Amino acid sequence: MQTYTIGHVAARTGVCVDAVRYYERVGLLPSPTRRASGCREYTDPAVSRLRFIRKSKDLGFSLDDIATLLSLRADASADKNVVGTLANSNLDRVTRKLAELERLRDALSDLMSACPGHGRRDAYQILQSSEHVERT
């Protein structure tokens, strides 16, 4: 069976070494066997699991959600409706965040359009107050 060092696993998965160690500590990644030197030895299933974790994080899932998804992958008898519930919840969170970002973009655009592009510093509204963007 092929084994990999933590650095190799990090390079293959796009997950930094510190994150690999963290995922082990919090139980998302099983602790690997160790060489006599103490170096971790990862297998292909660990690499696959790390890729799944990274892709799930890229999609905005929390580590708690990822733990649930990993347990669902491992348990053929698990309630697969949970996946849909988690995905819908994550989609709602992303939609709210997108709306907030669009609101911030519009507020910044309004402030920039009020800046003359030349002249005195006090002509720039964006510099006048730290409260130029009200939160709703």
Image: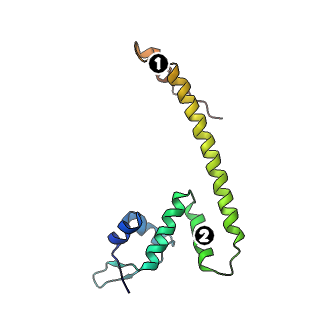
Q: Quadrant of the C terminus?
A: top right
As displayed, is residue 113 above or below residue 34? above
Residue farthest along the bottom direction in this orientation = 1
Q: Which label is found at residue 19? A: none
Question: In the structure shown, which secondary structural element does the residue marked by tag 2 occupy?
Answer: helix
Query: How many discs mark residues in the rendered view?
Result: 2
The residue that appears at 46% across and 14% down in the rendered structure is 123
Q: Amino acid at mark 2?
A: Leu
As displayed, is residue 10 above or below residue 3? above
For the residues labelled 2 and 1, say whether their Cβ atoms are less than 8 Å apart.
no
The residue that appears at 65% across and 81% down in the rendered structure is 76
Q: Quadrant of residue 91?
A: bottom right
Q: Is residue 79 left or right of residue 50?
A: right
Q: Mark 2: give few (<14), some (14-19) or many (20+) Cα within 10 Å.
A: some
Q: Quadrant of residue 88?
A: bottom right
Q: Is residue 10 left or right of residue 49?
A: left
**Where's residue 68, x and y in %?**
61, 70
**Where's residue 100, x and y in %?**
61, 40
Question: In the structure shown, which secondary structural element does the residue marked by tag 1 occupy?
Answer: loop
What scheme was used to colour the molecule?
A: rainbow
**Where's residue 2, x and y in %?**
36, 83
Q: Amino acid at mark 1?
A: Tyr
Between the residue at mark 2 and the residue at mark 1, the CA separation in whole angstroms equals: 49 Å
The residue that appears at 69% across and 68% down in the rendered structure is 82
Q: Mark 1: give few (<14), some (14-19) or many (20+) Cα within 10 Å.
A: some
**Where's residue 78, x and y in %?**
68, 77
In this rendering, does residue 9 appear at all?
Answer: yes
Mark 2 or 1 closer to N-term?
2
What residue sits right under mark 2 in the picture?
A: 69
Q: Quadrant of the N terminus?
A: bottom left
What residue sits right under mark 1 in the picture?
A: 124
The residue that appears at 50% across and 20% down in the rendered structure is 125
